[in-house]
Structures are given as C-alpha cells and as structure tokens.
Image (cartoon, rainbow, N blue to C red):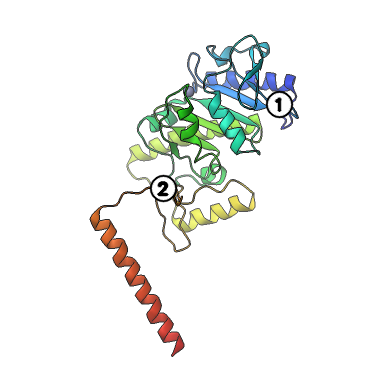
Amino acid sequence: MFDIKMNEQAARHMIVEVGRRLYERGYIAAADGNISVRLEGRRQLLATPTGVCKGFLKPEMLVIVDEEGRKLQGDLNPSSELAMHVTIYRLRPDVNAVVHAHPPVGTGFAASGIPLTKPLVSEVVLTLGCIPLAEYGTPTTEELAQAITPYVPHYDALLLANHGALTYGADLEDAYFKMETLEHFARIALVAHLLGQERPLPPEAVSKLFQIRQRAGRTSPTPSLCQVPTPSGRATEGPANANDRITLTRRQLVDLIAESIEATLAALIDENRSST
Ligand SMILES: [Zn+2]
C-alpha cells in the first residue's frame, strides 16, 4: 500500500492510516505525536496538525508546510514539534517520512535516562544499529531540534529524554515500522532486564552484523554508542566527536596514561625485535 514517491493524495491517506495505527497500538494518547512526509518534487512537507487526535485524522485535516516548516496550506496549524521533522529532512536527504510518538515502554526508558544501545537482539542491530537517547529539550522550542541534531546523521530511531521517540525512513512505511521495532525492542530489553540475565551479543557478533549493515548501505551509527568494538578490539563509550567533553576521575586518567605508555613500550620492543 505504501509507495516511496508520494503524491499529495496518496500521502494524505497514508498519514491518516499511520495515525490510526499509532493510536490503536497505544503509541500515542489524546493529541500526542506527529507525522510528516516529503511531497514528491515539491520541496514541501505534508504534516499532521496540532491539537487533534492522530487516531481519527481525515485527509483534509493535514497541513502543507515549506521546508522550513512555515504553513502554506490548511485550516489547522502544523504541530509545534515540526522543528524536529524539519531538522531531520535538512540533515538526511534520504529521508522522506518522519514519525514521532510516545510509545510507553520506549518512553519509559527515555524517562529513566536509559538508551536502547545494548546489542541484545541481532535483528535490531541489523535494522537500527542501536537507539540512542537524545538529551532533553523543551517541547515546542528549538531545543528539541538541537538535541537530536548530533544523532540524526547516524541513526534512524531515537529516544527523546523525558519525552518519547522519533523514527524516520525512506518512506512512511519504513518510518512507521521503525517505531514498531523500537517499541518492540524496548519491551524485549525490559523483559531481559527483569529476568536478571541480560546477555548482549559478543563484540565479534556485533561486528559481523555491522559489516552486513554496511554492505546494505545503511546508516553508520557512531560505533561507540552502539557498543561496536573499535579496530583495537575495544568498545568505547560516548559519541566519537573531537569536540565532545568527557569527564574522567583522577584514577581513570592515570590508568589511561599508564596503559598508553605500556602500549607504546610494547610496540617499541616489538619493533626492536623485528629489526634485529
Ligand atoms: Zn511529543
């Protein structure tokens, strides 16, 4: 039923359908959530309006905005959270649809400050890499758009701290199914945690899955966040950005320096051996 190239009428019906599914599955309540798509060849977006339940939309209720999110057409006003969508379309030319919802289990993780980055399920590593947690930003302000910006180029599904979840993809079906995957995985992660014996995939298995992702041309998540081993065989933590600030205890700093001296010495000894 979904087609990547969406003319306006088809897109209106698809958004209505996805709104209904989100509401039926309990991913949104009352007037929560929002959905948008790029309109084919028009540099415009079709988006859900603010203040209405997305479970009972009608095609004519949707709003057309420009690529900056300014309203062009429609009786109702676009969502106040549209800035997030605009940011995603700006940073990801491959994305044609965005879904934002508050699925209860995923949002529970987001409200607990826990990202869904452990490689617990191979299928999720293959499809999403992992699901990081973007910092809190006040809804209806630019803060939210700023909070997601570092993650958008590398991931297709995000948790929004103390707020909800965000997924996007090549078409609306893709974006919607990523939301289903996110919530399904959140449930699995919760059960694994409750059972008290979480067993994340070992680094070698995660590396293989990432190679398959790479061959399939999927986004390349920041390996560190998804707990993918670095070339030296160690997984690191936090986004690998040269401008990131990190905090270390004195002991950690001393250990790091000692480790690096040891590694340098070992390399020198090796070099000496091979040249003699
Ligand atoms: Zn929201």
- The residue to which callout 1 is attached is 39
Residue at position x 45%, y 29% in the image: 143
Residue 146 coordinates in the image, percent (x, y): 48, 33
Mark 1 is on which residue type?
A: Leu
Given this view, does label 1 or label 2 mark the residue nearer the observer? 2
Is residue 176 something one can see in this rendering?
A: no
**Numbered label attached to residue 111:** none
- In the picture, which quadrant includes the N terminus? top right
Vertical arrangement, residue 23 with respect to residue 160, above or below: above
Q: Nearer the viewer, residue 180 or 99?
A: 99
Residue 180 coordinates in the image, percent (x, y): 54, 31
Residue extending farthest to the left is 251
Residue 221 coordinates in the image, percent (x, y): 52, 47
Left or right placement of residue 42 versus residue 160 in this view: right
The quarter of the picture where residue 152 lies is top right
Left or right placement of residue 114 versus residue 2 in this view: left
Vertical arrangement, residue 189 with respect to residue 176, above or below: below
- The residue to which callout 2 is attached is 244
Is residue 147 something one can see in this rendering?
A: yes
Residue at position x 61%, y 46% in the image: 218
Vertical arrangement, residue 49 with respect to residue 96, above or below: above
Secondary structure beneath dot 1 equals loop
Secondary structure beneath dot 2 equals loop
- In the picture, which quadrant includes the C terminus? bottom left
Which is nearer the N-term, disc 1 or disc 2? 1
